[in-house]
Image: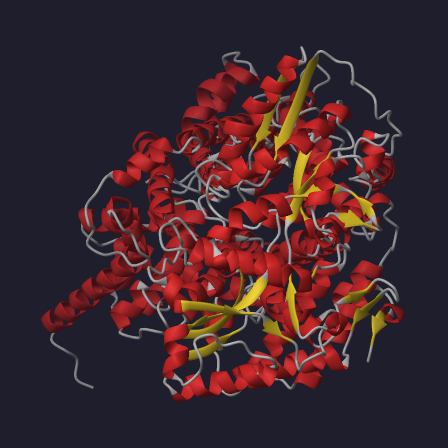
Amino acid sequence: MATATSPPPDLAVAPEPEPPATRRAAPTDVAGLGRGRAVAFVAPALALIAAFLVFPAVWTLYLGLTNYRLTGKAAKAPELVGVDNYTNALSDGRFHNALGLTLLFVFGSAIIGQTILGFTLAWTLRTARGWVRGLVEALVLLAWILPSSVVAFLWIAFLDRDSGTLNAILGTSGKAWLVNHPMASLIVFNTWHGTAFSLLLFGAALRTVPPSQLEAARLVGASTFALLRDVVFPHVRGHLLTNTLLISLWTFNDFTPYLITAGGPERHSETLPVYIYNTAIFDGQLGYGAAISLLMLLINLVIAMFYLRLLRERR
Amino acid sequence: MTRLDPAVRRALARIGFYTFIAAITAFFALPMLWLVSAPFDATPGLTPSWPDFSLKNFRALRDNPYALRSLWNSVLIAGGSAVLAVVCGALAAYSLSRVRIPGRDGLLYVLLLLSSIVTGTAAMVPIFLLMFQLNLIDSRAGVVLVLTGGLLPAAIFILKDFMDATPRSYEESARVFGASPLQILRHIVVPIVRPGLATIAVWAVVNVWGNFLIPFILLLNPDKQPAAVVMRTFYTEGGQPNLALISTFSLAYSVPVVVMYLFVNRRYGFRFHGGIKS
Amino acid sequence: MRRSNATTLAAALAAVALTTTACLGAKDDNADPNRGSGAKDVTLTISANAIAGGKNAVEADWVTKYVIPTFTAKLKQDGINATIKFQPSGVDDEQYKAKLALDLKAGGGADIVSLDGIWVGEFAEAGYLKPLDDVVGGDAVSKWDGWAQIPPTVQQNMSFTDKRYGVPSGTDGRVLFFNKTLLTRAGLPADWQPTSWADVISAGQKLKAAGVPAPIQINAGTAMGEATTMQGALPLLVGTGKEIYDPDSKKWQGATSNVKELLTLYQQIYGAGLGDKTLQQEAKGRDKSFADFAAGKIGILLESDYFWRSVIEPKAGIAPMKNRDEVVGYAKIPAIRPGAGVRGQDFVSMSGGGGRSINPNTKFPQQAWQLLAFMNSAEATKALLAGSARLTQRTDVNSEVLTADPMLDFIAKQVLPLTAYRPGLAVYPQVSAALQQATADVVAGKSPDAAAATYQSTVQKAVGGNGNVATS
């Protein structure tokens, strides 16, 4: 059954008189943490985050305002170029290409691929026999757990032009999937790689749908589609949104496409993370790469705000 | 339109179901076949084929001076990051869940976004220089600290979700009995959110296990480098992959993570979303 | 309440940013070259992009099994206790370069560092490397007898603004390899030596008529990276008479007639079916080209001697050819027409190679130089070869070792005098990438003029200023 998130009735109705101590506990602070100790609990995480996340991140953002390079004259004496990096990026066709490809990648593999496949699997496996369910879940999870470099190599071998398994099965020997259909291959790959998250999530969410409601709907003769729309969907909507946000952000920042196509051929699969890597390491333009990182972050922000607005509307 | 006989409809549905399951199983299993056939093949190619059975690849792996040690380094670094992320993350998530600190939601989202910068290549120089100033270059502990910093925002985000969804009645009762917040956390809350903690631990290990860039730039001595870095060295001078070593190492590299997941799942259950009692 | 929190946060971040500004520039000390020269206990570290059991394993083994024990023993005879360590690495060149730059920038890194010749300029400009004379002081470096054995052109590879920054550790040369069986089948002589680009094209057409799937393979596209530039665009460019960068006028080649001519050759090859277009786009295209040549699918291949001695080598090659010595021929790369090559040559080539340098932050400059000189001595160089034949930086070793291998002897005697090197400037990788893109465009069907125009605007943006780019 769904669990309560609000305080039990008795506390909410009759608030206790203020304790003599100056600490005032909020209604949700059932353990009596108080603000001071709450801050202390957060402190270790905050310290790590401040030192190893915020500090380098801010420094990187600062680099985005310079023409800093790892080697060459600009390494010794980087100059502040202000917004030049940003205006260059925004007017660079390569940046827009990378942005478009990344959005396509996120939309295709995360929003459509992983979500739909995850949900479909969760729904169909509800009624499957134990061993079938176990097998499918195990395979899906295995695809997620295997390290990126291994998985990348598996798919390079799978899609190989001359000796790949896919071509062997389809009989299309000589078809260069990664060269002629790079984004499609990457989208299918990422769906394969990341469905585990959605599968687990929807599996858990579907378990919260009261079986009685499902039974009632079925007795009335509702079609599967109506069942999903009217009974299931309202229960899973919140989870759907929050977790689609996470996998969208994760896919947006995913570097694995580099391991498979390295952005090729001719930048047809150069997503933003790959573009930044190519700019920062290959071209050595760290300042420019940092500026693009900030642009990426702003786009992530826009995406996040979009989801939050949807979430808030629901409430 | 005539309605099909219910028995026929059910049969069709079942055929459809099994076809779908078969297709899904094939989809997920096929790319992985190479991983189980190539390591045992004396002359592995890119296609998974019935292996020319031999264990010599494993011997070659054992003889490579860095391969096995790198697996141990991966275990150390991933384990360290997971432990640190779970402990600090749980503490922070608990207090953020129970106490209203101003700006907490906004802060969490900002941190989540910043973590995407720090895990990218552009942050390479700042991280390196920072670690150099802290004298943590060529130190696995330094790598753990940097990686944990990057993992924490998402870990806190997910754990807070778990904490929010657990009932507070137990904690209230414990407080009435005079337990301190730390005791409440340890004895009441942790057992309830254990699946969440286990999930975050697994997720942290999976993330760190495959991380290349940070260990690469921060560690100088290949004796300390994890498997993700060493795997990149199994190429010959011309960039030709040494398939025998790569396949065998990939298998060895994958097994620990899988074993860990199975262990955690059996003991604690593995869910990304909390508070759901099945 | 919230607003003042935000402003304090912003102020704190700004303070952090300002304090980190200072940390970005490289440290510039004037250290005494004679520091540590009298020490009785010396620690030195050697680094290289080589690792036992992986990339460049031969070099890694040479350092750990020969250089370190022998040099330690030498110092012991002088009463000095030396601890010499090796810092292996086995990753992509770009990643190794980034890591090396980071180490040097922070003031750390090994004492003897290996690096590619074309990185010297950008590392010097960034202050990461100093001229050897400055690091070691006095005339110890200039008096070394090894310099007489290293040709001036090869020394240039590890020099910048006419100062020596390191000692080269070998070089290579590029030629046209061809399959004699396929050529004779097409009616061409077994000792084929083209004298112009038209000769190459007509040979390709004859091969095509004889049924060879991919008559000519000259690397193109961005997938092969620097291999496209070094085994494709640049040898062709010097064949039209110009190098990619002119140090006198300080200009890079833009959409000049030379660039257009080289792109036209690509169009003649890939537009007329004389080459495999798809191969240029594959992620592992270069490896595939090796395998295809070994399998007899490619007739003519422009490659470096690395191909001969490590790829199609009959015993230990990646794509071994048992009958390599009988079936594979080699010819000098012709200029577009006789006498039109750079320096008025009829034939051209390009060379690369790396070398070793001394870290300016080393604690023992004198001893580091002794170690470096030892590593480049005749005995040590021969020990590295371990009986195999390859082009070393020393002519004395070459004349001893290469007589056994006619092909490498051919390169040492006939190709190296003709060769050119890439400019070691920081912005070169971007120019190279633009060149690769131009070849990719042409292979995909764009006209050479259009591709050259795009190339020019990319280069102008990269080098910052249209004045630095030659347009004709």
Instruction: Point out residue A4 in the picture as x, y percentages from the top left corner.
Output: 46, 38
Compared across the picture, whether A192 is left or right of B30 comes to right
Res B55 → quadrant: top left
Q: Nearer the viewer, residue C106 or A190?
A: C106
Q: In the picture provided, is B254 more to the left or to the right than C20? A: left
Q: Position of residue A183 (x, y in %)?
A: 49, 68
Which residue is rendered at x = 73% and y = 42% of the image?
A: C147
Task: Identify the residue at image location x=37%, y=57%.
Answer: C320
Location of residue C412 (image quadrant): bottom right
Q: Is residue C360 above or below residue B5?
A: above
**Residue at image x 29%, y 41%?**
B57
- Closer to us: B93 or A80: A80
The location of residue C445, given as percent across then percent down, is: 58, 84
Is C467 situated left or right of C434 in this image?
Answer: right
Is A77 drawn above or below residue A223 in the view shown? Answer: above
Q: In the rendered image, is residue A187 in sight?
A: no
**Residue ID at (44%, 44%):** B234
Above/below status of C314 relative to C163: below
Rendered location of residue C97, percent (x, y):
66, 45
Q: Can residue A106 be seen at all in this image of the molecule?
A: yes
